[in-house]
Image: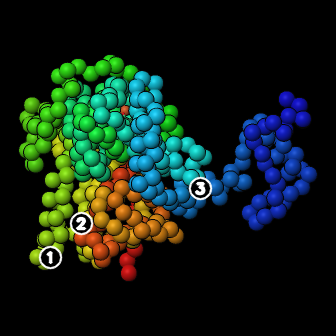
Amino acid sequence: MNASDHSTSPVRLKATASPNQPTPTPELEQLYRGFEQELLVPLWTEIGNLMPPHPRSQATAHLWRWDRLKELAAEAGRIVPVGRGGERRAIALANPSLGGRPYATPTLWAAIQYLMPGENAPEHRHTQHAFRFVVEGEGVWTVVGGDSVRMSRGDFLPQAGWNWHAHHNAATEPMAWIDGLDIPFAYNTESQFFEHGRDAINDAERATPERSRSERLWGHPGLRPLSQPIDTPGTPLLAYRWVDTDRALTDQLELEDEGHVGVLSPGHAAVRFTHPGTGRDVLPTIRCEMHRIRRGGSSQRWREVGSSVYQVFDGTGTVRVGQQEWRVQRGDMFVVPSWVNFQASCDAETVSLDLFRFSDAPIFEALHQHRIEVETN
Ligand code: GTQ
Ligand code: FE2
């Protein structure tokens, strides 16, 4: 390589006269050109970026409005076919500061998916972990490993990596829902695998049972089927029904009214969706929760390592993410980046603000890198 190749080297080093940097001299310039040629970067020019005192997320706090998401998904339903190749009519939230990539956060994919009446999304499997959450509508069954699982408003449907899955709309109306996956995490860590399955599911799988086989096995609180292994990496229960989630939150707030422990902070009840065999998170990389803040109530203000995506399930309220503040309503989705403060409050005009949340916390907990800081007043 000759000296004129400097300009094409991907490494660019500038000697600057700033504190904690060596004095710019012709010798230093010469040293830096040598580093560039050999593709070397010294720590002393990078330390501030590479090792900040605490997480400084590249991702931005951002809000997507449900009416626009749905409108555009419905338009895609009209124009864009679903089938092999594209695989899914899913439209991802792209964080404004992640370079136009289809990433809600550096680790999490969040998308609205849309299926027209009678349509099928073909079978495939991938190592990325996934879930669906339904904010409105019904009529689609997701078929996971041959088990048909009904999807209705408020239902949470996790699906651990490497399970075959397809979706079919058995109803006469289109249906939208949201998907959460660890696609960006798998992409950035270069750890993903993907396979196509059969182009069509069979008639038995096209069934529309009220309850899936997984719910008949695993959907009984505190009772585990002895025929089944319990230490699977992801939850064997494929649907967490809204009636159960709703009752759990209602009970917590009633216990608070009766003067017993039941809530996280006054007026703020929350549950985490868990693996019925282990009590741990439903997916190895994704934590999922439902929060309910009653009229006039607020959550605590806190920040934690890792990023979250929220969807408003019901009610109206105000959410504060770092310096941002938004009035939110049903279906709206927003991002809370790593180590950025979050607080939510319920309006006076609504009974409660219900927030569905997913985050990448299990990754950091597994690696002993998770921290949380709750503001105390
Ligand atoms: O439904 O199988 O939003 O594989 C992204 C990737 C949904 C799915 C997404 C997927 C799916
Ligand atoms: Fe998939």
Q: Quadrant of residue 2?
A: top right
Does label 1 or label 3 sit earlier along the sequence?
A: 3
In the rendered structure, which amino acid carries the disc numbered 2? Answer: Ala
The spot of residue 6 in percent (x, y) is: 84, 38
> Which label lies toward us, 1 or 3?
1
Residue that carries the numbered disc 3 in the rendered image: 51
Say which residue appears at 36% left-offset and 69% top-offset.
Answer: 317
Give the camera-side residue of 241 and 301: 241
Q: Secondary structure at mark 1?
A: helix
Q: Secondary structure at mark 2?
A: strand
Q: Are marks 1 and 3 in contact (CB under 8 Å)?
A: no
User: Which circle marks residue 257 in the picture?
Assistant: 1
Q: Quadrant of residue 47?
A: bottom right
The spot of residue 296 in percent (x, y) is: 29, 77
Image position of 311 (left or right of 270): right
The spot of residue 128 in percent (x, y) is: 39, 35
In the rendered structure, which amino acid carries the disc numbered 1? Answer: Asp
Say which residue appears at 24% left-offset and 33% top-offset.
Answer: 170
Say which residue appears at 57% left-offset and 49% top-offset.
Answer: 98
Residue that carries the numbered disc 2 in the rendered image: 269
